[in-house]
Image: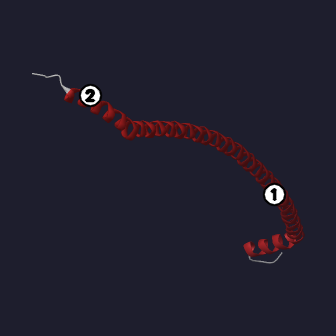
């Protein structure tokens, strides 16, 4: 059974003293540390959020610059390709014109040689005919 004497009052006083001491020595510092930790975590989360936003903005800037550079590169490539095609076409036209001129020159030379040979053969035709007839007949004409 519980007896009510002075020890009960001492125990109650002891309990209050212990409660105040533990509150001042243990509970308040732990609560303070937990509060600081919570504030620090919230600050870090805010910083992480800011860093993520900045990273996303920078990524968008890089993507935009890459798209712009890609467009410029495509335009430069198309321009170079068009210039090369034009230069090739001009060179091909020049080569065709040169070949046509050489062809006409050679055709004119062949035609002149043909006419010269024809004229030469025409002049010697009477002599050849007489000679052939004399060879065929076996006597001179």
Instruction: Residue at 36% x, 40% y: name it.
Output: 26
- Kindly check if marks 2 and 1 are in contact, taking CB atoms under 8 A apart as contact: no
> Is residue 51 toward the left or the right of residue 68 in the image?
left
Q: Mark 2 points at which residue?
A: 12
Residue reaching furthest left? Answer: 1
> Is residue 105 toward the left or the right of residue 23 in the image?
right
Position of residue 66 measured from the top left corner of the image (x, y, whole percent): 67, 45
Q: Distance between the residues labelled 2 and 1?
A: 113 Å
Name the secondary structure under disc 2: helix
> Is residue 103 toward the left or the right of residue 51 in the image?
right
Position of residue 99 measured from the top left corner of the image (x, y, whole percent): 81, 60
The crowding category of the residue bearing disc 1, from other C-alpha atoms within 10 Å (few below 14, some 14 to 19, many at least 20), is: few
Of marks 2 and 1, which one's residue comes earlier in the chain?
A: 2
In this view, the residue in front, 42 or 71, is 42
In this view, the residue in front, 114 or 12, is 12
Q: Residue 105 — which label? A: none
Instruction: Residue at 20% x, 30% y: name it.
Output: 7
Position of residue 90 measured from the top left corner of the image (x, y, whole percent): 83, 54
Instruction: Residue at 29% x, 30% y: name it.
Output: 13
Q: Name the residue under label 1.
A: 91
Position of residue 138 measured from the top left corner of the image (x, y, whole percent): 74, 77
Q: Quadrant of residue 27?
A: top left
**Quadrant position of the N terminus in the picture:** top left
Q: In which quarter of the image is residue 106?
A: bottom right
Name the secondary structure under disc 1: helix
Q: In this rendering, which labeled residue sits more in front, label 2 or label 1?
A: 2
**Quadrant position of the C terminus in the picture:** bottom right
């Amino acid at each position: 059974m519980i007896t009510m004497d002075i020890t009960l009052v001492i125990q109650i006083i002891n309990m209050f003293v212990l409660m105040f001491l533990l509150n001042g020595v243990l509970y308040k510092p732990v609560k303070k540390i937990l509060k600081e930790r919570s504030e620090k975590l919230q600050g870090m989360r805010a910083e992480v959020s800011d860093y993520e936003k900045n990273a996303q903005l920078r990524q968008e800037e890089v993507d935009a610059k890459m798209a712009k550079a890609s467009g410029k590169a495509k335009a430069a490539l198309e321009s170079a390709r068009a210039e090369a095609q034009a230069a090739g076409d001009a060179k091909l036209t020049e080569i065709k014109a040169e070949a046509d001129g050489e062809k006409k020159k050679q055709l004119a030379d062949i035609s002149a040689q043909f006419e010269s040979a024809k004229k030469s053969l025409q002049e010697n035709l009477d002599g050849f005919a007489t000679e052939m007839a004399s060879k065929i007949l076996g006597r001179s004409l």
